[in-house]
Image (cartoon, rainbow, N blue to C red):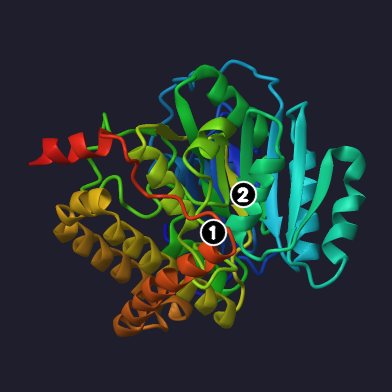
Amino acid sequence: MELPGRAPAWVGQVERRTDGADALDLSVDPRYLAARLLVTTGGSPSGLITVGLTGGRATTSTVRAAIEAQLGPDTGEEAPALPRSVEPLTVVIATRDRAESLRTSLAAVVAGDHPAVTVIVVDNDPPDESTRLVAEEFADRGVVYVRERRRGLSVGRNRGLREAVTRLVAFTDDDTEVDRRWASRIAAVFASEQDLACLSGPVIGARLETEDELAAERALVWNRGFAARRYSLADPPADSAIFPFSPGLFGIGANFAVRADVARAVGGFDEALGAGAPTRGGEDCEFMVRLVLAGHRVGYEPGAFVWHHHRSSPEELRRQLRGYSMGLGAFLTKIALDPRAGAMAARRLPAAVAQFRQIGTREATAGEGVAAGNLGERLAWIVDGGSAYVRGRRATRRVGGRVPRLSPLRSNVDSHVTSER
């Protein structure tokens, strides 16, 4: 069942192995004609379903039938057990002038079940003291406030990475609510896979009240499914013709974690990219691609998920889409300016064009707010992002900011290019 086009959808979470004739009964406000449910199986996320509601209600049998139809039967298999890890972990949230949203995000992080989490709130070029005051509300629960004079999401993440003293550092945004087991699952995966450099997970719409929130959920596809994935140059995925350059393949910046020493070794985040920079986006994709090009292994774990508050108005959504298009243009420009990465990407150009068309088709049918910009306008935004990156990296270097190379100087990328010929 598809999400409704206009009517609000209730968002919730259910466990399919719950027993009882009324165990999955739904009873919500009657204005909701559908429910969007994250289904867990034995506590592990297994998929998203949409259930029709009548007067805000659906019976257990209706919900179970929707789960079977949309996710398939329960095979009875258990997700592989992860070792419990209590290794300390730092969560970095870079923010600017969004105090109320930040309060919600912090409340979710500190409510998690991991016993040793420190949260660093990086306040980028703050216009007032509201962010500091919110952070101080949580000071006795492991939240540390840091003021950063320079603006930009990548600047803030680099500052957080520099301030962190733990080996593991996770990043989320000020418009998310992390799952209660988010940090503990991240720590467990890193404990079980010592060669993993970076881990991401699903980003799921927390509210689907407006047409624009519904359109964003349909168009943006911020989760890569509910199967664990691992990626490396040595083992490229069969289902990505433009690997490793596919935007969003490895996850997005609202939900990922790194081994701090590896992140620092590859140069941290490109400060000419991301929100707050002229390019407006692209920093998360570029960083994860850079890790892969450096020979590292990155992963996607469905159990480490977060809820995201989508933009709720046409104007906000349009600004967001423009930012993503500009970020894509900036990322593509950085590839083109790198001889080694550019040689790899050139061989993938036909597949990249096909993927761009698929994304355009998906967005065009997602809703009026998403479809507002025609193809010509999107292409213009991409071109704007490219020119903004060229200007932005010069300006970043002038002030001593970080603009790391996309591909390493050593030969692992060269050997991969040679193997493709």
- Which mark is first along the chain, 1 or 2? 2
Rendered image quadrant of residue 315: bottom right
**What residue sits right under mark 1 in the picture?**
271
User: What residue is shown at x 60% (from left), y 78% (from top)?
Assistant: 313
Name, please, the residue furthest toward the left: 421
Asked if residue 419 lies left or right of residue 62, the reply is: left
Are the residues tagged 2 and 1 within 8 Å (C-beta)?
Answer: yes
Left or right of residue 189: residue 23: right
Compared across the picture, whether 258 is left or right of 377 comes to right
* Residue under pointer 2: 158
Quadrant of the frame with the N terminus: bottom left
Q: Do we see residue 58 in this rendering?
A: no
Is 225 or 388 nearer to us in this picture? 388
Q: Please tell me which residue lies in front, 392 or 398.
A: 398
**What is the x, y in percent for residue 166?**
69, 29
Amino acid, disc 1: Glu
